Each structure stands twice: as structure tokens, then as C-alpha cells.
Image (cartoon, rainbow, N blue to C red):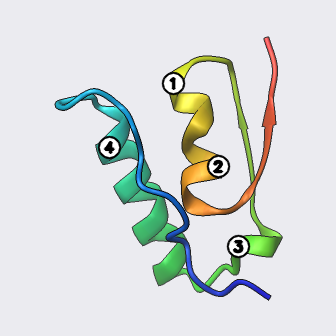
Amino acid sequence: MQKEYNLYEPTWCPGCGNYMIRTALKRALEELEIPPHKTVISSGIGQAAKIPHYIGVNGFNGL
């Protein structure tokens, strides 16, 4: 079972605000000791929708 939140390096453009969102979310989940397999992120479509993939949690994308 996966215990860390680092799976893939993001491919967003340099300076994209998604890096900070990803970092803050990852830190919060680690501090709260919430395991990746118990985490679900719901998002829209677009670049931010890749966050679940980049930190290895379950995700749902919709419009």
C-alpha cells in the first residue's frame, strides 16, 4: 500500500500556481496523517485536475 504522496513530477508551466496548490495540499495531508488511499480529490477539468495523479490519491474530474 502506498504511504507517500510523491508519484510523478508535474509538467505544468514554470510559475503556474498549481505547484503551490499541490505543495500545500500534500503538506496538509501529510501533517494530518491521512493516507493516500483514503483521499479523494474532486476537481474540474484542465491542468489543476492533474493534482490527484501527481500526488497519488483518488480523483474525480467533472464539469
Asked if the residue under mark 3 is in contact with the one under mark 4, i.e. CB atoms within 8 Å, the reply is no
Residue 36 numbered mark, or none: 3
Lower position in the chain sequence, tag 1 or tag 3: 3
Lower position in the chain sequence, tag 2 or tag 4: 4
Secondary structure of the residue carrying tag 2 is helix
Residue 6 numbered mark, or none: none
Q: Identify which residue is drawn at 50% across, 58% down.
A: 8
The amino acid type of the residue labelled 1 equals Gln
The amino acid type of the residue labelled 2 equals Pro
Secondary structure of the residue carrying tag 3 is helix
Residue 19 numbered mark, or none: 4
Quickly name the residue at label 2. 52
Asked if the residue under mark 3 is in contact with the one under mark 2, i.e. CB atoms within 8 Å, the reply is no
Q: CA distance from mark 2 to mark 1?
A: 11 Å
Residue with the most extreme top position: 63
Quadrant for residue 23, please give it: bottom left
Q: CA distance from mark 2 to mark 4?
A: 13 Å
Q: Height in image: 20 above or below 2?
A: above
Is residue 6 left or right of 12 when viewed as pictured?
Answer: right
Q: CA distance from mark 2 to mark 3?
A: 10 Å
Secondary structure of the residue carrying tag 1 is helix
Asked if the residue under mark 3 is in contact with the one under mark 1, i.e. CB atoms within 8 Å, the reply is no
Quickly name the residue at label 1. 47
Q: Identify which residue is drawn at 50% across, 79% down.
A: 30
Is residue 44 left or right of 12 when viewed as pictured?
Answer: right
The amino acid type of the residue labelled 4 equals Tyr
